[in-house]
Image (tube, coloured by chain):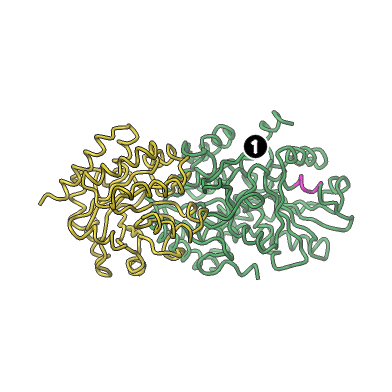
Amino acid sequence: MFMELPDKNGHFGEFGGRFVPETLVSPLEELTDAYLKYKDQEDFKEELDQQLEHYAGRPTPLFLAQNLSARLGGKIYLKREDLCHTGAHKINNVLGQLLLAKRMGKKRIIAETGAGQHGVATATGCALLGLPCVVYMGEVDVKRQALNVFRMQLLGAKVVTVKSGSRTLKDAINEALRDWMSSARDTFYCLGSVVGPHPYPTIVRDFQSVIGKEAKGQHFDLEKKEPDYLLACVGGGSNALGLFFPFLDDPEVKIIGVEAAGAASLCLGTPGVLHGARTYVLQTSTGQIKDTHSISAGLDYSAVGPEHANLKDMKRVSYVTASDKDALWGFKILSETEGIIPALESSHAIAHLRKMKLSKDQTVIVCLSGRGDKDVEEARKLV
Amino acid sequence: MSKITDAFKKRKALIPFIVAGDPSLAVTEKLVYQLEEAGADIIELGIPFSDPLADGPVIQAAHARAIKVSLAQVFSLVKKIRKRTAVPIIFMLSDNLIEKYGASKFYDDCKKFGVDGVIVPDLPPEESPADNIYLIAPTTTEERIKRIASASTGFIYLVSVMGITGARRRLSGDLGDLANRVRKFTDKPIAVGFGISNPAQAKEAAKSADGVIVGSALVELIAQKQFTKAIKLVANLRKALDAR
């Protein structure tokens, strides 16, 4: 039943929808029509599968982390999205959206980025497909992710520093949407998470659910059953929904999303409207959007995908928080026990394993959404 | 809404936009009286929000300057203003502020305090529970123009250009066409906004529309605390609209 959502207007229960200035309604309708037209066409699917396999490096392994399991209990499987080209799951969605952009005849690509992973993935895909690319990034993030800014520039993208508002991801999305309001006729907005107005939450979820489809098959081959738990970090929530979605209608699979304690829209926010969707939002008592503070730029966002908001209210997924300190613990323990340095985002999910107290035949799939190379400098200051 | 419709009957309507609380609620109050005196027919008050999506840099900065001012405080301001003038006042605000305030309380308070119309730029009629003034953009399809024109109350807000608010060097050449496309479906008044910054552009826009909305040019002068110049601009816009 959860897998049938959203309805035709993009609503997930009380959440989602299309709360945008009139100028964007037609471009969003055009995108919805194009997506529905191409998504099931054989040649579109084939081209995407080819690129996912030979360019992005899919399928990614499902790795049994035996040392970590011995330390923390249960059988911990890591879905290795960190091994994707560009170092995170973001490329799955970018390749899908860019193929769509080409089919739609769009000549220019814009994107927003927080930590820089989606920006790098978009710049990468644009280099491959020969499309000009502009990435909006908040000034605060430009400073703390300088290496990713250089990567994007190296890949031929133009990085625009956003100096309005809190100068982070939220403001980068505002600025990308503002660009799109004047450029939609020839420009495709490649949005990086399951947020924003309909149809973006659905498109991004669908392109990311390759994670969960693969993991489901891989886990079944190894264990001859469904996993007991799924675990993923949630900022906007695209790696989490990518893993969760194919399991949503299996009620025996328990699902947990982990938010950064300083940006916990689902755990600490209230329903509101931001970036074109009704969802949980961190806001003041008078409705101003609050700034967030997390060690991980990729989770530093004041709202969350509307489908997560519905899954929370319907009690299908439990959402919990991990602090900066917890995340650093996760960052260290996975590095030490398995020789895998996780992204600080994914480290939030690793950290929650400590609280789960699994028995020895219970299995959990953790989405290791990205690799930690980008965070080593930041972590060196703090560990 | 009849106060709004009436405002379009006697002459081309002039609708200045300012952000409430920029630079203070006391100044906003004074500006409302002076704008009316200078020839405004309807006053549009922006309610400060942290993330005004449809706005360009000038109006974004005004929201940031006034960010401590709450919707409840602006209702109190309107209550005060209503002791002195009945000039139609409309609110322009982001949907999140209404959600947080409570939609039914919000619309009740509009009636109670004398707010004559509401524009929520990020709330298309499909998502809206209430009677608002809706926007039509150059990208709006004919089918939607029909729906929006019939849903909009008071007047129709025609967005003259693709993009966000802010001064433009020239108006869109298609404005007349766009207005005609709307008039096929409605006899409600049409006001044009986004990108109108001077008397010549106002006069040009009024050839195809029943009213003009001027925001960024006015807000820019307020940012520089050039209040006399701001009022002068409105007086000049009035003259341009009244000239034959």
Query: Residue at label 1?
Result: A374
Q: Is residue B62 visible?
A: yes
Q: Secondary structure at mark 1?
A: helix
Work out which residue is located at the far top of the displayed protein and give it.
A381
Q: Quadrant of residue A260?
A: top right
Characterize the local packing of mark 1: few (<14), some (14-19) or many (20 or more) Cα atoms within 10 angstroms.
many
Q: Colour of chain B?
A: yellow
Considering only vertical position in the picture, is B29 above or below B182? above
Chain identity of mark 1: A
- Position of B228 compared to B66: left or right? left
Identify the residue shown where x is 57% and y is 66%: A6
Q: Foreground: A114 or B180?
A: B180
Q: Colour of chain A?
A: green
Q: How many marks?
A: 1
What kind of residue is marked 1?
Lys
Q: Quadrant of the N terminus of chain B?
A: bottom left
Stretch in magenta: A350-354
Identify the residue shown where x is 85% and y is 49%: A69
Q: Foreground: B130 or B195?
A: B130
Q: Foreground: A45 or B237?
A: B237
Q: What x and y, as percent, mark residue A346?
A: 70, 45
Identify the residue shown where x is 45% and y is 42%: B69
Considering only vertical position in the picture, is A35 above or below B216? below
* Magenta stretch prevailing secondary structure: helix
Work out which residue is located at the far front of the displayed protein and give it.
B83
Considering only vertical position in the picture, is B105 above or below B71? below
Q: What x and y, as percent, mark residue A217?
A: 74, 63
